[in-house]
Image: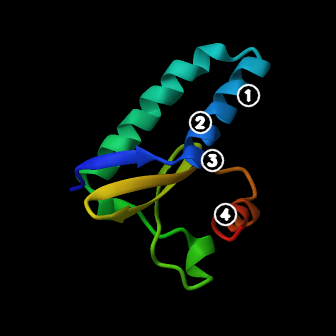
Amino acid sequence: MVSQVVLTDAAAKDMQLICDYFLANQQGHRIEPFFNQMEKVFQRISQSPDAGSWPSELLELGIHDYREIFSHPYRVVYYCENNTAYIMLIADARRDLDTLLQMRFFT
């Protein structure tokens, strides 16, 4: 169990971009369910931070510090340190996550 879940600036921007997409495509009604879905994911991470799996894209690079929770269609990538879970990435799983993860974690 972790004491808090913190959204990094990059993850907050991910959420904003998803909401912007909904608005741009006349799908504003999807914003509230999206936030409810993310809240459930964050609660799950808070209660069971080790429940997430290791992202295969990072495992291939020998990186075992990050975990992910898949909540269709989103992947939430995070790591835990000092009783805090840091949300690093929120992305639609249909995106090219190899490139996205490399840009996020190696630039």
- Amino acid type, label 1: Tyr
Q: Amino acid at mark 2?
A: Met
Instruction: Name the residue tied to disc 1.
Output: 21
Nearer-N-terminus badge (2/1): 2
Which numbered disc, 2 or 3, marks the residue closer to the eye?
A: 2
Q: Percent position (x, y) of residue 86? A: 42, 54
Disc 2 to disc 1, how far (Cα)?
10 Å
Q: What is the spatial separation of the Cα atoms under label 2 and label 4, in whole angstroms?
A: 16 Å
Callout 3 amino acid? Ala
Whether the residues at callouts 1 and 4 have beta carbons within 8 Å, the answer is no
> Which scheme is used to colour this image of the protein?
rainbow
Q: What residue lies at 48% left-to-right and 28% top-to-bottom? A: 35
Residue drawn at the location 39% of the way across and 61% of the way down: 52
Sequence-earlier tag: 2 or 3: 2
Q: Which tag, 3 or 4, sits closer to the chain's start?
A: 3
Pointer 1 or 4: first along the chain = 1
User: Residue tagged by mark 3?
Assistant: 91
Q: Residues within 10 Å of mark 3 (few under 14, many from 20)?
A: many
Precedes in sequence: disc 2 or disc 4: 2
Mark 2 vs mark 1, foreground winner is 2
**Which of the labelled discs sits on residue 15, or is there none?**
2
What's the amino acid at mark 4?
A: Leu
Front in this rendered view, residue 83 or 31 = 83
Q: Secondary structure beneath disc 2?
A: helix
Q: Residue at 59% of width from left, 43% of height from top? A: 73
Give residue 4's position: percent from left, percent from top.
Answer: 29, 47
Q: Residue furthest bottom?
A: 62
Q: CA distance from mark 1 to mark 4?
A: 20 Å
| Helix, strand or loop at mark 3 | strand
